[in-house]
Amino acid sequence: MVFPVGDDNSDRTTFPFVTIALLLANVFVFTVLQGMGANDDVTLAYCQVPAEIISGHDVVTEPSVRVVETPQGAVQVPDPGLKPTPIPPWMTLFTAIFMHGSIMHLAGNMWFLWIFGDNVEDRMGHGRFFVFYLLCGVAAALGQTVVAPSSTIPMIGASGAIAGVMGAYFVLYPRSRIVTLVPLLFFFQID
């Protein structure tokens, strides 16, 4: 595992307004609207569901409990069910980009946005960067929808948008050095 800490692109000429606004929007949605991930009603109402995108209609499912096999044995996992979407299903392609499943999911995405987004925004310009970010998130969601068109599994997160930003960074700054942290984990077994 490699964790980026920073880069050597200190020649930015503009302030990263959009990157900071996206960071704040994602944090606001997760902490306030999603209640730190505890508000399933909001999460399941505004998540992106491939079957809804394909059909253009809500898919509502009842709460249930499913059994998942793990190395430790069978575990019961509660499924709160899908809620009605108060907006047209196609709009969830955008709302889902700003929601996250956990604090670590949010922190990871926002860290990568902070490291790479400011430079891409500087090169693209504020407006183009914002549109690019949204298009990358939508393209990733549509890609998953094409792969699994009948899926009723909710999709949330900015990972597709962040992947697009990272790809743009590597195209725009192919020779930049990225400072990384490589955690070394040692395991000792004493008999």
Image (spheres, rainbow, N blue to C red):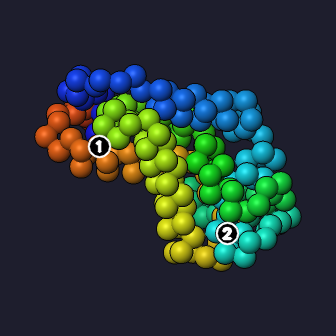
Q: Is residue 153 above or below residue 105?
A: below
Asked if residue 95 is positioned above or below residue 55 in the image, the reply reads above
- Name the residue that disc number 2 marks: 53
Q: Residue at x 41, y 30 (%)?
A: 114
Question: Is 2 positioned to the left or the right of 25 in the image?
Answer: left
Q: Tell me, yes or no, if residue 6 can be seen here.
A: yes
Name the residue: 66% across, 35% down. 30
Q: Could you classify mark 2 by the number of other residues whose Cα lies within 10 Å: few (under 14), some (14-19), or many (20 or more)?
A: many
* Amino acid identity at mark 1: Tyr
Is disc 1 surrounded by few (<14), some (14 to 19) or many (20+) residues within 10 Å? Answer: many
Residue 122 placed where, x, y %? 34, 32
Q: Position of residue 158 (x, y in %)?
A: 52, 46
- Kindly identify which residue carries mark 1: 169
Sequence-earlier tag: 2 or 1: 2
Left or right position of 96 against 108: right
Tell me how far mark 2 sits from mark 1, CA to CA: 30 Å
Q: Are discs 2 and 1 less than 8 Å apart at CB?
A: no
Q: Is residue 175 above or below residue 50?
A: above
Question: The disc labelled 2 sits on which kind of residue?
Answer: Ile
- Of the 4 image quadrants, the one containing the N terminus is top left
Looking at the image, which is closer to me, 89 or 47? 89
